[in-house]
Amino acid sequence: AVLLHRPGPELDGLADPNAVQMLAPLDAARARQQHEAIAQAYRDAGVAVHYVAPAETPPPNLMFVADLMFMTPEGAILGRPASTVRAGEERFIARRLADLGIPILRSVRGTGTFEGADALWLDPQTVLLATGLRTNAEGAAQVTSLLHELGVEVILVGLPYGSMHLMGEIRFADRDLAIVRAGRVPYAAVTALRQRGYTVLFLPDEGEAVRGMALNFVTLGPRRVLMAAGNPIAQAFYEAAGITCHTVVIDELRQAAGGIGCLTGILQRQPVAQP
């Protein structure tokens, strides 16, 4: 099950995209069409789609739900965006999670900042957590404290200067297969992955990673992903690794500086029996 925010009037008439951390002016209608295509791709794959559906017009970046929450087996940790442009977006997520009956285990507070795209589950007992541009040491400490209460091991890594989120440097295609960006992924993260039995593959084309959001995919099942269309090098690379690729066009949404992974809050995954 996933949580999405369907873009609404908040995208209309943005006079200065840079002021809201976007790359270029958006064709709002086209962005909405592409977002709906992502939602339909999830439905076609058997994924339950829930919407934030705020009662008021939200800030323009609310559609990037992955930054605003991080799920655990017992409930959600609310993000606290580092950017002043996104400050307070988490309240919309909190309301919707409550409506869905999902407990909120912690809300990062004080001087802490934390964005959900900086935390990744390596296995049911281990989380990889990054500090950097969007998650600071205090936010990471608060998240680590909660995860330790749940009996989860936390591996803390630092992101290289210029990286926005850990999600942008590492994605999992299967329980034993990780795709990463060379020169961006923390060395300690690759070490941790290999120690836990992962095969680590390096994305072959940096241009597609940056311009095409080729690594910003969502895994639908073992070696089955939903990725941005228009990345032939990455798609061929994934398919050579035995990954089935479902694609959607997101060239308009990319102008808002995010991809499919950024747009998707993972609420729940169904366990798959190991072969």
Image: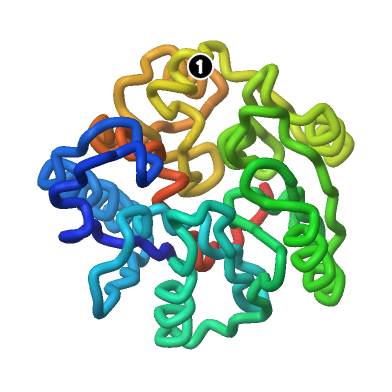
Q: Is residue 68 left or right of residue 159?
A: left
SS class, disc 1: helix
Whether residue 2 is visible here, answered yes or no, is yes
Q: Is residue 260 above or below residue 40?
A: above
User: What residue does disc 1 label?
Assistant: 237
Residue 135: x and y, percent? 68, 51
Camera-side residue of 241 and 144: 144
Check the picture and name the quadrant holding the N terminus: bottom left
Residue 130: x and y, percent? 73, 46
Camera-side residue of 133 and 6: 133
* Quadrant of res 233: top left
Q: Residues within 10 Å of mark 1 (few under 14, many from 20)?
A: some
* Quadrant of res 89: bottom left
- Look at 24% across and 49% down and name the residue there: 35
- Look at 30% across and 21% down and name the residue there: 230
Whether residue 173 is visible here, answered yes or no, is no
Q: Is residue 5 left or right of residue 233?
A: left
Look at label 1 and name its amino acid. Answer: Phe
Residue 270: x and y, percent? 54, 64
Q: Is residue 275 left or right of residue 240?
A: right
- Look at 46% across and 38% down and name the residue there: 217
Q: Is residue 132 above or below residue 272?
A: above
